[in-house]
Amino acid sequence: MTGQRPHGIGRRGLPAAAAAWTALPWPPLPWPPLPWATRPARAAAGRVVCIGAALTECVFALGEGPHLVARDSSSRFPAAALALPDIGYMRALPPEGIASLSPDLVILSEEAGPAEAVAVLRATGLPMRTLPDGAGPGAAEAKLRGVGAALGRDAEPVARQVAADWAMLDAPLAGLRARPRVLFVLSLARGAPLVSGEGTHADAAIAAAGGVNPVRGWRGYRPLSAESAATLAPDVILMMDFALQEAGGAAAVFATPALAVTPAARAGRVVALDGGLMLGFGPRAAHGRRALAALLHPDAALPPLPERPWTAA
């Protein structure tokens, strides 16, 4: 058959074929739309793996929880997320395990890793959407819109409500006279407190709740010496609730040499909050802001925020 034209219409036959096509008894325009043409486009065909606690909350807030087939170990809210298979820590991803789930879409926080594992995951050809893990005003809405775009879901109604809840706290917190110096302690596991500097979610959470992070001049997390702690002079020690429990409670925290010399130790002020609520900057961002502000400013008159479907466990 080499050299022969396959069955079909040759170039010379095209004009005649076109004339015959137009001469057929087609129904008058406009033709009814084909069924597939009127269906809303969806980026996710069904099976979704979500990596990142705030992004998982966004999926549920947008009503897409039933599409999830797995989560990372940090995704512990809402309670329905805990029923999903746990693929492990988001910074130690198992690409083969994720691929074995045959997801139609992987939604990935930019904080996920290691980079080699993410590269292997990309090489599988699975559809992936990597989203920023921002903090501060507007971060929750950006995550909702990113997840909504990935899933083909309109996120604006939820994003607007989250923004409105956040805005309810702006004026009351702006009018506060006192702004405590708040030191966020991530861990005491190695003896020296691991504390938050600039550019962290904890730094953004403290500022949003009407506090001041006394650590300036470096970004991320570093161990704190007693000399540095005395200079920083925090009024309040802030921790995640499970970290405070693991440390042995407030007495154990203030028994640490680096923290024993602080005004917070003398006043006995250590406060703790759920990490996902306080630091996630997902759909519960405004409620987390209020919860932290109430701990830092117990005498402040803060407005109650509306209960939302995505804030209920």
Image (cartoon, grey):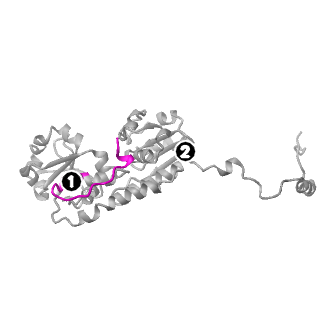
**Residue at the image point whose x is 40% and y is 37% from the top:** 80
Determine the CA span between mark 2 and mark 1: 39 Å
Nearest the eye: 167 or 101: 167
**Residue at the image point whose x is 52% and y is 44% from the top:** 122
Q: Is residue 240 magenta?
A: no
Q: Is residue 127 left or right of residue 190?
A: right
* Mark 2 or mark 1: whose residue is earlier in sequence: 2
Tell which residue pokes out farthest to the left in this image: 266
The amino acid at mark 2 is Ala
Q: Return the x and y of residue 292 as percentages of the image width and height.
A: 23, 52
Is residue 8 depicted above or below 79 in this figure?
Answer: below
Q: Quadrant of the C terminus?
A: top left
Nearest the eye: 24 or 140: 24
Q: Which residue is mark 2?
A: 44
Residue 201 got which mark? none
Magenta part of the protein: which range?
Answer: 291-313
Q: Return the x and y of residue 167 as percentages of the image width and height.
A: 33, 62
The amino acid at mark 1 is Ala
Q: Is residue 236 left or right of residue 139?
A: left
Circle 2 or circle 1, nearest the eye: 1
Q: Is residue 22 left or right of residue 283?
A: right
Nearest the eye: 129 or 147: 147
Mark 2 residue element: loop
Q: Return the x and y of residue 224 as percentages of the image width and height.
A: 17, 50
Mark 1 residue element: helix
Instruction: Please rate how many residues cluster around mark 2, counting C-alpha atoms within 10 Å: few if below 14, some from 14 to 19, many from 20.
Output: some
